[in-house]
Amino acid sequence: GWSRSPKRMAGVDAHHGAEGMTRLLGASEIVVCLVPLTDETRGLFDRRMLVAMRPGALLINFSRGPVVVTRDLLQALDAGRLSHAVLDVFEVEPLPEASPLWAHPAVTVLPHISAPTDLHTAAAVVAANVAAYRASGRIPAGVDLARGY
């Protein structure tokens, strides 16, 4: 896994920062992108990052479309640098009919529903947040406007 700052999780080889990202990309057969869209992540997967990926790797983007530079992704796929891309989000949404992503043999376009909401687990999260508020009088942590997520 990768994050901006150091993290420790049992059973997870955790990387952080620019060097950690490069190490992770170079070692991973499948990269699943789940970062928020911020000024720092817009265009994160550009030519430089795609070249840093392990040859033949697969990229899955379930985050936000502008995190991946479509032109650079298509070039990496056409050059055989990456084997496949699974995309649930796009730089322009809805994805225009004329987009080359629709017909590219190494791209799977998903209908922008990477996962349905499970009512039971979603309700449990809401109930836990309400209980925490009632117990402390403080709203549980949410969006950090300074970070952008």
Image: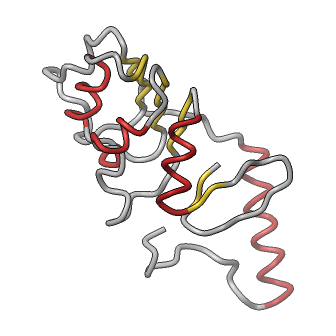
Query: Relative to the observer, which residue lies in front, 60 or 131?
Result: 60
Residue at the location (43% across, 71% down)? 148
Q: How is the image coloured?
A: secondary structure
Which residue ends up furthest to the bottom in the rendered image? 137
Q: Is residue 46 left or right of residue 97?
A: right
Q: Residue furthest left?
A: 98
Left of 131 or right of it: where is 60?
Answer: left
Task: Please state which of residues 135 and 43 is positioned toward the viewer in this rendering.
Answer: 43
Q: Relative to 72, does residue 56 appear above or below in the rendering? A: above
In this rendering, the count of numbered labels is: 0
Residue 13 sits above or below residue 79 on the image: below
Residue drawn at x 73%, y 62% as measured from the top left: 126
Residue 104 place in picture, x, y as percent = 28, 13
In the visual, does 48 lie left or right of 108? left
Left or right position of 104 against 38: left
Residue 53 position, x and y percent, is: 45, 35
- Picture coordinates of residue 49 (x, y %)? 37, 43
Q: Is residue 27 or residue 59 the one in the foreground?
A: 27
Image quarter for residue 95? Answer: top left
Give the quarter of the image for residue 132. Answer: bottom right
* Residue found 22% across the figure and 40% down from its top: 92
What is the x, y in percent for residue 61?
45, 37
Q: Give the answer, above or below, for where 110 lies relative to 48.
A: above
Q: Residue at x 18, y 28 (%)?
A: 96
The residue lying toward the viewer, choosing from 92 and 67, is 67
